[in-house]
Amino acid sequence: MIAIESLTKRYPRVTALDRLTVGITPGVTGLVGANGAGKSTLIKILLGLAPATEGGATVLGLDVAREGSAIRERVGYMPEHDCLPPDVSATEFVVHMARMSGLPFTAARERTADTLRHVGLYEERYRPMGGYSTGMKQRVKLAQALVHDPKLVLLDEPTNGLDPVGRDEMLALIRRVHTDFGISVLVTSHLLGELERTCDHVVVIDGGKLLRASSTADFTKSTPSLTVEVTDTDAHPDGTEALRSALAAAGLTARAPGSAGAPGAGHVLMVDASDESAYDTVRDTVVELGLGLVRMEQSRHRIAEVFQDDDRTDGHAGASPAMSSSAAGPATAGDPAADCQLQPQKGGSGDAV
Ligand SMILES: Nc1ncnc2c1ncn2[C@@H]1O[C@H](COP(=O)(O)OP(=O)(O)OP(=O)(O)O)[C@@H](O)[C@H]1O
């Protein structure tokens, strides 16, 4: 969908993009980076709205330097900032944007009605947008990006300003843009956790440089570790501790997850399961102690942990603190995770996601 080759953008005081080389394949791709990492600059260059200083890129095979208007015909764009005129309705605005993209009036009206319904705006669509909530405004911005049935949409921080429920709804909507309509998505965020749930691929940039590009599944590879949660009983008022000692006696290493604030922390154990028999040992030990087994599941990395692990293991300048997971989960502090180490990449075919 997108090929970026040694792309550099220098402003007088700052290098916003620094020899960035990466390929974006069909599907939903997350572009993640802290504030100022260069995400919006990259999107503007991909749309042909800003020139690159060096290097180049193609979008749907079209050159960003020479074929910007052809790219904008085929690509939808949802900007980060609030850009909606307050005194017109969502319907009027989206029809206007559809007409700007070349749709005849009748088709523009029909597509607008369909698209606004798809993003979850119903009767409100006839009211002036000045009175909309942030969530409704984000939906209108998404609708205008989709209304001309593009092959690809570039969404700049679509979850900005939304509460957790609004964010989940927006992420689900973005996922459906691809699954229901086959439109590929490049979505930016500074929250690794939210991209993990939504994207097939993740590209991480920092200071305009590529840190890592790979499939989400590679980021979140399962670890040889079991997350086990048990109940307490009268006989074992601290069931978790009772299980930990019994497992230790059975030769299994179990420890509390690193993140005290994680859901269930205090009642959760991470059990080393490099040997398959660990599953049976855990089950049998829980039964022998008479505890209730709430869950026993294979642990997976969260994307943020890939970067945290890297910071811990070799002190490499990994993700900045701003790039945090939006949802705390059981941490795997101390896991070796050698296959998930953060490696700045130097370009070339290995960068394609
Ligand atoms: N028009 C401009 N003139 C000068 N510097 C700019 C301009 N646009 C962006 N920059 C700088 O380039 C760097 C990258 O900015 P950019 O907006 O692309 O980052 P971002 O990752 O999108 O961050 P945010 O999430 O805060 O929008 C920043 O240091 C920013 O100050």
Image (spheres, grey):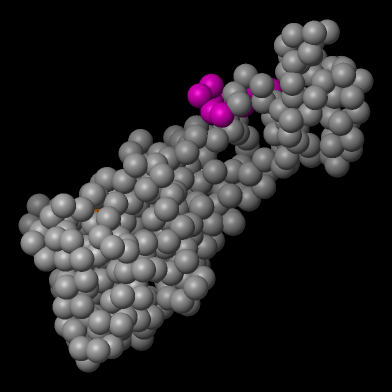
Which of 25 and 146 lies nearest the eye of the viewer? 146
Q: What secondary structure predominates along the stretch shown in magenta?
A: loop
| Residue 309 placement (x, y as % from top left) | 52, 37
Q: Which sits in the foreground, 167 or 187?
A: 167
What is the x, y in percent for residue 118? 39, 68
Q: Nearer the viewer, residue 157 or 10?
A: 157
**Which residues, given as a range, are shown in magenta?**
254-263
Residue 56 in percent (x, y) is at 27, 76
Residue 53 in the image: above or below residue 39: below
In the image, residue 165 lies in the stretch drawn in magenta: no
Is residue 154 in sight in this rendering? Answer: no
* Relative horizontal placement of residue 21, taking residue 304 as reference (left or right): left
Q: Is residue 53 left or right of residue 162?
A: left
Which quadrant of the view contains residue 4?
bottom left
Residue plotted at (11% across, 66% down): 88
Residue 266, by quadrant, is top right
> Residue, x 54% and y 43% (percent of image)?
302
Q: Given the current orientation, which residue lies at the most extreme front position? A: 123
Whether 111 is drawn above or below 255: the answer is below
Q: Quadrant of the N terminus?
A: bottom left
Query: Residue at coordinates 79% horizontally, 39% vertically from top-left?
Result: 274
Q: How many marks?
A: 0
- Drawn side of residue 219 relative to residue 348, left or right: right
The location of residue 203, given as percent across then percent down, is 42, 59
User: At 43% across and 73% down in the image, what residue appears?
Assistant: 184
For this orientation, the residue located farthest to the bottom is: 104
Question: Do we see residue 108 in this rendering?
Answer: yes
Residue 314 vertical placement versus 339 (above, below): above
Q: Nearer the viewer, residue 306 or 244?
A: 244
